[in-house]
Amino acid sequence: MFSRTVIAGCAGLLLLVACGGWKEVRMELPELNSAGSLRTEIDRALREVKEAQAALSPDAGKARQPLAAAVESLHRLADYYVPVLIARDAAYNAYRLFQLRDNNAAVKEIDVAADTLAKTAEAGGGALNKTVQEPLDALGEAKLAVTGDRPEAGQTLQRAVYLLNGLIVKGGLVAREE
């Protein structure tokens, strides 16, 4: 159940927006490297699972299979999901910055998304290269549209974010195609 404070805050925000009192507010937030923290946790979990595998007795066949599956899942997280999430977040940030009319910062975020996605595809090879091509192309189109301050830039960025979301949704299928 929502608290009265949350409901009152939401009502106040709605009233502020309805009365035309909304002002664009931008503030610098500290860089939070959640993806780096996630990678650290994945690396830690991989080490611990590998230690558990090494500690198993030779007759522990039933335990080896789930541990091997855990290692595979952790690699999929580190090598696919985390980079795609970073790319999606950068593309979303680009869209937000574009809406705030900060095209230079938006282009930098598009570059982060494209570079991250390209490195992921390069490391994954084969099927992954084919899968990320459409989102990479969309990011390239978005960069051209934002740089040229074209009217379709917002829609182009939305499409790139949509395609990156699709990579996350179908991620398990993509990561297993190799």
Image (cartoon, rainbow, N blue to C red):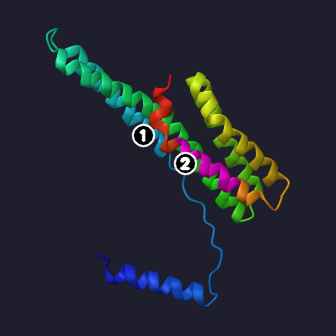
Vertical order, 148 against 43 (above or below): below
Between circles 2 and 1, the one closer to the viewer is 2
How many circles with numbers are drawn on the protein? 2
Q: Secondary structure at mark 2?
A: helix
From the viewer's side, name the closer residue of 104 and 90: 90
Q: Is residue 161 above or below residue 23?
A: above
- The image position of residue 129, as x and y in percent, is 62, 28
Which secondary structure dominates the residues rendered in magenta?
Answer: helix
Q: Amino acid at mark 1?
A: Leu
Q: Is there a contact, CB below 8 Å, between mark 2 and mark 1?
A: no
Residue at figure coordinates x 64%, y 42% from the top left: 113
Q: Residue at horizontal 55%, vertical 50%?
A: 31
Asked if the stretch drawn in magenta spans residue 104, the answer is no
Q: CA distance from mark 2 to mark 1?
A: 19 Å
Quarter location, residue 75: top left
Q: Name the residue beneath numbered marker 1.
A: 38
* Residues shaded magenta: 157-167
Which residue in the structure is indicated by mark 2? 165
- In percent of the image, x 48 and y 86: which residue is there? 12
Secondary structure beneath dot 1 equals helix
- Type of residue at label 2? Asn
